[in-house]
């Protein structure tokens, strides 16, 4: 997979959490931005048609206060996730990861349904879908357990199963393991990975700040200051991040 060259001489502090506050992205603004993303993503090429998630050249800015200049949140962002793969979106706090995910979300609304009732399925079809989805995330043995008895990670896996049961082709997952312990964290990641790989049709874009989760991905995207710095396979992203951390340590004379 082609990976563009990283930006030259990034700030040595760019791996530190950004403590500035970002303006809130409204639903209307996100929808308007996503319509532009949808139009930009249209393409007649076979390669583009094969992407499960694709965004091209998306920029987004807001007025922080009345009378003030526009504050850029996203800057010419492009990404592509093939079906059957789990990709991770990484970067320091405040770099625009969640905003980009929210912009992408309305562009896949046709793939998302809320509840199996709207599909007018028979009871047997509903049971079959639920069983298959729970099995995909390793929760079939817990199907008769009260939901309140499940751990945080198990509840996350049940939520993923709900999306799979609805035949969603895209999973957009924002900091899904933030408040989970290590055991549940790994369980959720593996559930998503197995679900995506097993179907061959579902694609997942996983926003995280945990670099240790990267090894479970098929590819990754790294952001800074609202821009996608590098987009490619896990080995390339890992090498880039290790070199970046080494430069930061050298800067601090560690």
Image: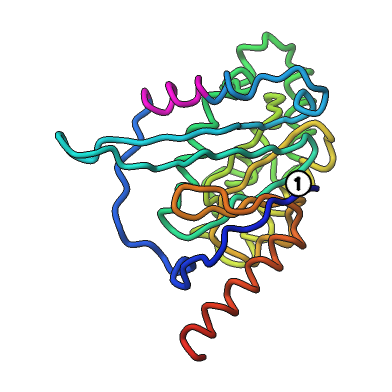
Q: Nearer the viewer, residue 154 or 8?
A: 8
Q: Residue furthest toward the left?
A: 67
Q: Nearer the viewer, residue 88 or 138?
A: 88
Residue at figure coordinates x 68%, y 40% from the top left:
204
Residue at figure coordinates x 69%, y 51% from the top left:
4
Question: Residue 119 placed where, x, y %?
Answer: 67, 12
Residue 177 in view:
no
Q: Secondary structure at mark 1?
A: helix
Residue 75 in view:
yes
Residue at figure coordinates x 77%, y 51% from the top left:
218
Q: Residue furthest toward the top?
A: 120
Residue 104 lies left or right of residue 18; in this view the side is right
Q: Reply yes or no: does residue 30 show up in magenta.
A: yes
Q: Reply yes or no: does residue 211 show up in magenta.
A: no
Crowd band around label 1 with a 10 angstrom C-alpha radius: few (<14), some (14–19), many (20+) = few
Task: Please tell me whether residue 32 is drawn above or below residue 1 in the rendered image.
Answer: above
Question: Residue 61 placed where, x, y %?
Answer: 36, 36
For disc 1, the marked residue is 141
Question: Residue 108 placed where, x, y %?
Answer: 60, 24
Question: Residue 131 placed where, x, y %?
Answer: 77, 33
Q: Nearer the viewer, residue 158 or 190?
A: 190
Q: Residue furthest toward the front?
A: 8
Q: How many marks?
A: 1
Residue at figure coordinates x 73%, y 16% from the top left:
123
The magenta span reads 28-36
Residue 95 lies left or right of residue 49; in this view the side is left
Residue 39 lies left or right of residue 233; in this view the side is left
Task: Please tell me whether residue 14 is drawn above or below residue 107 in the rendered image.
Answer: below
Q: Main secondary structure of the magenta part?
A: helix
């Amino acid at each position: 997979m082609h990976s563009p060259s990283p930006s030259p001489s990034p700030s040595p502090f760019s791996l530190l959490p950004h403590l500035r506050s970002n303006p809130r992205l409204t639903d209307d603004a996100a929808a308007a931005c996503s319509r532009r993303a949808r139009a930009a993503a249209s393409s007649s090429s076979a390669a583009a048609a094969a992407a499960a998630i694709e965004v091209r050249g998306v920029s987004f800015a807001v007025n922080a206060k009345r009378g003030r200049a526009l504050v850029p949140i996203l800057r010419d962002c492009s990404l592509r996730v093939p079906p059957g793969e789990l990709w991770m979106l990484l970067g320091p706090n405040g770099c625009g990861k969640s905003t980009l995910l929210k912009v992408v979300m309305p562009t896949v609304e046709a793939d998302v349904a809320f509840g199996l009732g709207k599909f007018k399925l028979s009871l047997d079809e509903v049971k079959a879908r639920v069983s298959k989805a729970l099995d995909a995330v390793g929760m079939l043995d817990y199907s008769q357990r009260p939901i309140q008895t499940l751990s945080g990670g198990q509840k996350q896996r049940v939520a993923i199963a709900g999306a799979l049961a609805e035949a969603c082709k895209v999973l957009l997952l924002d900091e899904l393991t933030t408040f989970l312990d290590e055991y549940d964290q790994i369980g959720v990641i593996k559930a998503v990975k197995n679900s995506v790989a097993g179907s061959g049709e579902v694609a997942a874009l996983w926003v995280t700040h945990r670099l240790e989760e990267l090894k479970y991905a098929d590819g990754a995207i790294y952001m800074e200051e609202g821009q996608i710095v590098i987009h490619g396979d896990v080995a390339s992203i890992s090498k880039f991040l290790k070199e970046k951390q080494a430069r930061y340590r050298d800067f601090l004379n560690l």
